[in-house]
Image: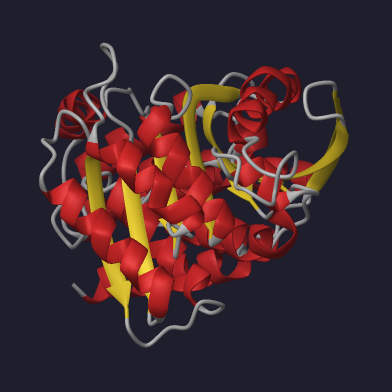
């Protein structure tokens, strides 16, 4: 048990060290909304460990204020296999009222009610550009706060054809006399696609914000799971401005509930893990293949909990899929060494060291240290 916690502390250090990373940017000249939109992109740490692995994409509304903390938390959570590794894309709207409302309000003629057109922009202009530049899978998650939380609520309830999951943080459901809630009252199951996984939250907020949330909860409680797949949470200690940090973390954990096959100290073999995710695919309606961090976490857990052969099998499969991952090769060297296979351990460590130097890896010093120990043995 002590060795497991030692490994856990090492993993925590790696996760903390990788909490922030530079974002890439690109622009889209939209003909649909007649704007030039700047998108900021945070790639998973393992993105360059494979030439073919595809990642879900998360569209962050109000990206100018919400992108950094969401990208950092996705990176942290995925390191421990709590959520998948995700390509996070921050997008900001120049006219929030127009783009994030689906009805035109009196007094706001021409300045509201553009949500459907903005959705077309995301689906037909932005996502194709992302797909052109990055390896994205056909799984799209959106998140928004306040007025953009109203918009992600609209997507969750009107566009199962476009998105798979949605997070709505303190959504402005009061808009146009609670128009969206009135739509939800009459909603029926959409076509053949499973309903969007939807997480809704509310902070300690007064008046129409709280009233909208209360009304929504009452309406959703009367709908079957075939119409809406939702969870909700209130954060009484948070304000409207502070709640996005915690609500997005809880929203991600809610949407990907059950994703971590070994959340505590229990362990599984490679075959058991593969069976687990085959079953998870039925729950989610989408196949999430195991990522670098899953192979790493599950392999090390198995080895440190006394199933060395399981750990070796998981990590060997990991380097088969992600042959450019210095992290997996280094972990494989660790479990080979635990199994008293010094020759294989050194070969794996040499591979890890070569890749770490090529990638200018932040893990280079740790990998060098293990390689030095193995060389002296």
Q: Position of residue 342 (x, y in %)?
A: 43, 47
| Residue for point 38% across, 25% down | 160
Image position of 100 (left or right of 250)? right
Q: Residue furthest front?
A: 106
Residue placed most toward the observer, 325 or 133: 133
Q: Is residue 307 visible?
A: no
Q: Position of residue 214 (x, y in %)?
A: 25, 65
Note whether 286 is above or below 296 in the view shown: above
Image position of 100 (left or right of 239)? right
| Residue for point 35% across, 72% down | 210
Q: How many marks?
A: 0
Residue placed most toward the observer, 26 or 171: 171
Colouring method of the image: secondary structure
The image quarter in which residue 182 lies:
top left
| Residue for point 78% across, 22% down | 32
The image quarter in which residue 5 lies:
bottom left
Image position of 28 (left or right of 179)? right
Residue placed most toward the observer, 87 or 146: 146
Q: Residue furthest bottom?
A: 237
Q: Is residue 32 visible?
A: yes
Image position of 32 (left or right of 295)? right
Note whether 94 is above or below 224 in the view shown: below
Q: Position of residue 80 (x, y in %)?
A: 39, 57
Note whether 226 is above or below 209 in the view shown: above
Q: Position of residue 358 (x, y in %)?
A: 78, 41
Q: Quadrant location of the N terminus?
A: bottom left
Q: Residue furthest top?
A: 192
């Amino acid at each position: 048990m002590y060795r497991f916690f030692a490994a856990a502390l090492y993993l925590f250090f790696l996760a903390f060290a990788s909490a922030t990373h530079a974002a890439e940017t690109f622009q889209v000249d939209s003909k649909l909304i007649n704007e030039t939109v700047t998108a900021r992109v945070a790639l998973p740490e393992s993105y360059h460990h494979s030439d073919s692995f595809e990642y879900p994409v998360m569209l962050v509304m109000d990206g100018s204020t919400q992108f950094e903390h969401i990208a950092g938390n996705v990176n942290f959570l995925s390191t421990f296999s709590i959520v998948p590794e995700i390509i996070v894309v921050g997008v900001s709207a120049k006219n929030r009222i127009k783009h994030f409302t689906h009805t035109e309000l009196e007094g706001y003629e021409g300045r509201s009610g553009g949500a459907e057109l903005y959705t077309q922009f995301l689906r037909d202009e932005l996502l194709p550009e992302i797909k052109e530049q990055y390896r994205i899978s056909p799984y799209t998650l959106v998140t928004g706060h306040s007025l953009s939380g109203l918009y992600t609520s609209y997507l969750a309830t009107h566009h199962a054809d476009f998105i798979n999951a949605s997070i709505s943080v303190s959504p402005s459901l009061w808009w146009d006399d609670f128009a969206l809630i009135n739509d939800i009252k009459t909603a029926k199951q959409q076509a053949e696609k499973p309903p969007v996984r939807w997480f809704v939250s509310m902070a300690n907020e007064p008046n129409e914000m709280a009233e909208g949330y209360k009304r929504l909860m009452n309406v959703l409680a009367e709908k079957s799971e075939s119409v809406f797949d939702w969870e909700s949470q209130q954060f009484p200690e948070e304000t409207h401005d502070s709640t996005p940090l915690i609500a997005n973390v809880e929203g991600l954990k809610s949407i990907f509930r059950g994703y971590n096959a070994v959340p505590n100290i229990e362990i599984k073999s490679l075959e058991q893990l593969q069976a687990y995710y085959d079953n998870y695919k039925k729950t989610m309606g989408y196949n999430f293949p195991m990522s670098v961090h899953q192979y790493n976490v599950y392999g090390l857990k198995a080895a440190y909990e006394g199933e060395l052969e399981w750990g070796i099998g998981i990590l060997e499969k990991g380097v088969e899929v992600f042959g450019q991952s210095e992290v997996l090769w280094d972990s494989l060297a660790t479990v080979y060494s635990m199994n008293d296979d010094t020759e294989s351990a050194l070969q794996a460590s040499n591979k890890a060291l070569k890749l770490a130097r090529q990638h200018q890896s932040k893990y280079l010093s740790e990998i060098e240290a293990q390689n030095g120990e193995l060389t002296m043995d």
